Structures are given as C-alpha cells and as structure tokens.
Image (spheres, rainbow, N blue to C red):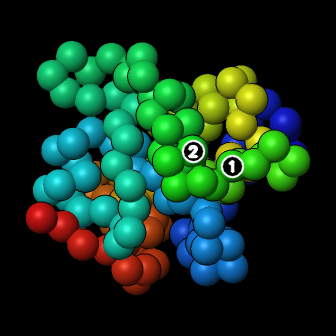
Amino acid sequence: MNEDQPQGLNPQEAMELLESHPQAVLVDIRSSMEFLFVGHPKGAVHVPWIDEPDWVVNPHFVTEIRKLLLGGAACDQSAGCAPVILICRSGKRSLEAGKALISEGFKAVYHVDEGFEGDLDEQHHRSTLGGWRFQGLPWEQC
C-alpha cells in the first residue's frame, strides 16, 4: 500500500469497516446537487471536495473533516483519529481528497474505489457496473 494515498475499498469492504468500527465516518465528498438528487449512502456526512457554483477544490475541506472528527470526539492523542472513508461518484475525487487528508497528517484514510455510481458502461450509464448503489448497499435521496 502506498502511504501517500488512501487505501481503496470496494463498497462491501467499506460497509464492513463501518460496521466493525462504529467510530468510523463515511464522508460523501460529491457536490451538493449530487448528494441531494442522485442519492447518497445512508448515514454519510456531506463535505464537498469540489462544489457548485465555482467548481473549485474546497479550501476548507481538511479543516471541515478535522472538525467533524473532533466534534464527535473521534480523535485522541495516542490512537489518532477514527477511520475516514471517502466516497464520490466513481472513486477519482475521493482518491484526490484522501491524498490531501494524508498530506495533512491523517492516518486512517480510505476511499470507496468504485464510488457511489461506479464507472460508465458502454451506453454511458452509471450504476450498472459497480458502485455503492449497484451493490445494493443502503442509500437514500432527497
């Protein structure tokens, strides 16, 4: 495993980590529109990595994740912070966001390598080849 990158998990492995580590946090990093209208994993916290209207990297992303963990008392001096699992649409943004967290000292950083919707199929549709939703894991939408 590359120590500069978050560890990739498939959706089932991410769900198992959440179930076996109740302090773990699942963070959906997609845009607000994606989170609300496409749907999101049940129980996921929304902290966008890139969001509308400017579509630039959120300059407060690392701080917001730190607040999320400290606000839930999910960090301590000796053990570090609780596992953070990032999810986006297909696993690309979560990889980049995870690298940013690791570069800022986070230790237990994971990302769902299939994302919420998975890759595009031959008809340019998502949720047919992989992803959280395709795997039948709990999700909801507004």
Residue 22 in the figure: left or right of residue 125: right
Q: Amino acid at mark 1?
A: Cys
Q: Residue at x 53, y 28 (%)?
A: 62
Residue where numbered disc 2 is placed = 70
The image quadrant that residue 103 belongs to is top right
Q: Residue at x 27, y 39 (%)?
A: 31
Residue 138 in the figure: left or right of residue 106: left
Residue 12 in the figure: left or right of residue 77: left
Viewer can see residue 119: no
SS label for mark 1: strand
Query: Cβ–Cβ below 8 Å for labels 2 and 1?
Result: yes
Mark 2 and mark 1: span between their CA atoms?
Answer: 6 Å
* Crowdedness near tag 2: few (<14), some (14–19) or many (≥20) residues, C-alpha within 10 Å: some
Viewer can see residue 1: yes
Q: Amino acid at mark 2?
A: Leu
Q: What x and y, as percent, mark residue 108?
A: 74, 49
Residue 52: mark: none
Q: Residue at x 61, y 74 (%)?
A: 22
SS label for mark 2: helix
Q: Residue at x 50, y 28 (%)?
A: 63
Q: Is residue 30 above or below residue 117?
A: above
Q: What x and y, as percent, mark residue 88?
A: 42, 48
Nearest to N terminus: mark 2 or mark 1: 2
Residue where numbered disc 1 is placed = 75
Q: What x and y, as percent, mark residue 124?
A: 28, 52
Image quarter where the C terminus lies is: bottom left
* Crowdedness near tag 1: few (<14), some (14–19) or many (≥20) residues, C-alpha within 10 Å: some
In this orientation, which residue lies closer to the viewer: 110 or 64?
64
The image quadrant that residue 132 belongs to is bottom left
